[in-house]
Structure formats: C-alpha cells, structure tokens
Amino acid sequence: MKTLFGAATLSLALAAVLQPAQAQEVVIGVPVASTGIFSFAAVPGRNGIETALEELNASGELGNVTLKLLIEDTASDKNQATTLVSRFAQYDKAAVILGPTSSVEAFAALPVAQEQGVPVVSTASADVTRVGDWIFKSNATPATIMQALGEQAAARLAPKTVAYVFNRDNDAYIAQKNGVKDLFEAKGIKTVAEETIVGSDTDFTALATKLAALDIDTLLISTTAETSANIIIQAKQAGLSDKVRILGTPSMASQQFLKVGGSAVEGTIFVADYFLESASPLNKTFVEAYQRKFKIAPDVFAAIGYNQLKVAAAAIKAAGPAYDRAAIRAALLTVKDLPTVLGGGKLTINDNRTPTYGGFVLTVKGGAFTLL
C-alpha cells in the first residue's frame, strides 16, 4: 500500500510538471488619439502597436502570457484622455498603459496613472517622465533627438540668421525648438525672430507675410506635420525665398507632411527617430508585416507605436511570474540593448526612464524621404 501510494504521488507530481503552464492574461490600456488634431500620429502609431501584437502572438516569445489590449480613442482631448487612464487604472485593472498620444493629453492624464501606481510607456514627445517615477518613455526626448539635427545643420549648412515658428501651447514643440535654438546660439548663430502659433490655427497669412519679409537664411518650424506643411506653402506663396533652408521636427517624417506639402516641402530637412529604408533585418520584417496588414508603408509614428509595445512586452516578459504593476515597472528599468527599428537599432532605458537609440537626419527629395 505504501508503494502504491508513493507511486501515485509521484505520478501526480510528474503530471503537474508536464502540464503546460496556465495562460496568464496581462491587460494593457491604450488611450490613443484616433480622431482629432493628433490623429496624424496616433492612427499610424495604433497600427504599429497592432503590428507588434500580431508578431508577438505569432512568435510565442512571451510564453504563456497573453496580451489583452484595450484600445480607446481620446479624440485628442485631454479630459477624455484623463477619463480613459482613470478607467484603465481603476476599473480595467490594467497592468501597464501605452499612451496617451500627445504631450498635451499626457501631462493632463498621467498624474492619474502615477497616483494609481500604474506603469506607463509613453510616446508623447515631451519629457513626461517628470510627472513621476511610474512614467517611462519609449521614444527619445525632444531635446535629445533635435540635437542631431542642430549639429548636422550647423556643420553642413552653416546658418547665420534663423527664424523659429513653434506651437506655444505644446511643451514638446517648445522643447524641440529650444533643442536647436540653444545649440545654434551657443555656436553664435543669430536668432532673428520667434513666432508662435496654437494647435488649432489654420490661417497663416499674416505669419507667412512676416516670414517672407525677414532677412534670414534658415527657418525652423516646430509643430504638427499638416500645420508645418501649410505654413511652408503659405510662406512660399507670400514670397519666402527658395534660398531659405527649412528645418523641422520628427513630425515632418510623416506621409501626411508629404501629402499636404507636395512640391512646396522639397528640400525640407528634419530629424527622425525612424527611416523606412533602414537595412536592419528587424526593420525589414516590420515593414513587410505593416504593409501586408495596412496596404501602406509605415512612417515614423507607426515605428514608434511598434517600438512602444515591444518595450512594454520586454518588461512584461521579464516581470514573470508575477506580471503585476510593480514587477513590470521594475523590469522597465532594466531594459538594455533591446532590438528596435528606431535609430541605431539598440534601445536602452536610462536612469531618467527615457530611451537612447540615436536618430536619422532626413530630407525630402523627389517627393520621398532620404538621408541627408
């Protein structure tokens, strides 16, 4: 009897070992601006997230973990974003949040996530990590990414007189403008004018006339893709010289910029986290999967969204077996040399909870993006 009992116990133990681990569902809240002023970035970003999700599911790299994404539209409204983050944190019990899209939404909504102790992986351009120690970024800060543009522009274009146009109601665009302006002024490059707009502006007639009358050799525009294109079109219609070099922010690395700007944006120079023609194997896999799913090539925002979920997934994988909020937050702090489609191909989260990976300086040539 003792032998039979011992054998039965051993059989049960072996059966427990041999049985596949029980599936673990991890809920991820995704508040994105699928409509409204920030949709130019959010729609491809959301598509990038969905592409990454399909890849993760197909690869099985997360083992017994299933990711459940709750994707909701903020409508580019900071109050709606705050409501969604609160819902994800308190009602849906999300283990991590991806978003919101814009800095305006993020600064309003992320204090809720910080208070509730939910790790956030944000793609907002501004340095939203200052909200608190539960907030991380999956893309470089504005000042960091714009330094590459400033250095190359100073060395290759030798600007002497510069005017700046930027969104005064968006911290990210202010920081991006300052990232170049501060570097230029440190090199003795003169600031001739600083002109501001707000995100809802559409008529730039007066601004265009003023820009055309300035004695400048360089113009930097720091705002959304569509607005940047419209400012350039109207400024050239007002008489802005073709000899004025136009610089811009990562927003210009969008198909919307090319679509709206047409021939007017030829020769525009800007910095981008992502370059479609990068020859890395990971980028080729991403481009093929994205085009197969959405019938269009990915832009910088699609790549940032793809990277956003990959960063979160790496932390979730490392957070097992608990997979709770605290474990995921701790794991995010250890992300190092993660393969990425951004910049130089390796991403590390630094002590400021922001990533480093490099950037590309691009120009528009023949209606397409190319390396400067």
Image (cartoon, grey):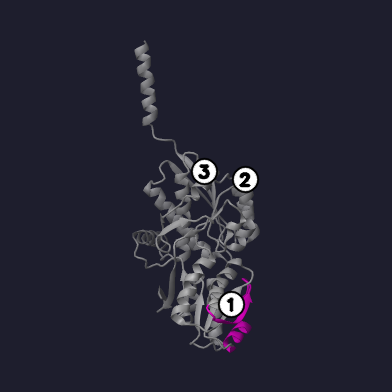
Which amino acid type is shown beneath numbered disc 2? Gln
Element type at marker 2?
helix
Badge number at residue 197: none
Q: Which residues are magenta?
A: 187-213
Q: Within 10 Å of the Cα at label 3, are there few (<14), some (14-19), or many (20+) other Cα atoms?
A: some
- Would you name the residue on which mark 3 appears? 327
Residue 370 in picture, x, y percent from top left: 40, 74
Mark before the other along the chain sequence, 1 or 2: 2
Q: Say above or below: 272 vs 211.
A: above
Residue 52 in picture, x, y percent from top left: 43, 54
Q: Say above or below: 359 vs 324.
A: below
- Would you name the residue on which mark 2 appears? 90
Badge number at residue 165: 1
Element type at marker 3?
helix
Q: Within 10 Å of the Cα at label 2, are there few (<14), some (14-19), or many (20+) other Cα atoms?
A: some
Residue 161 in picture, x, y percent from top left: 55, 84
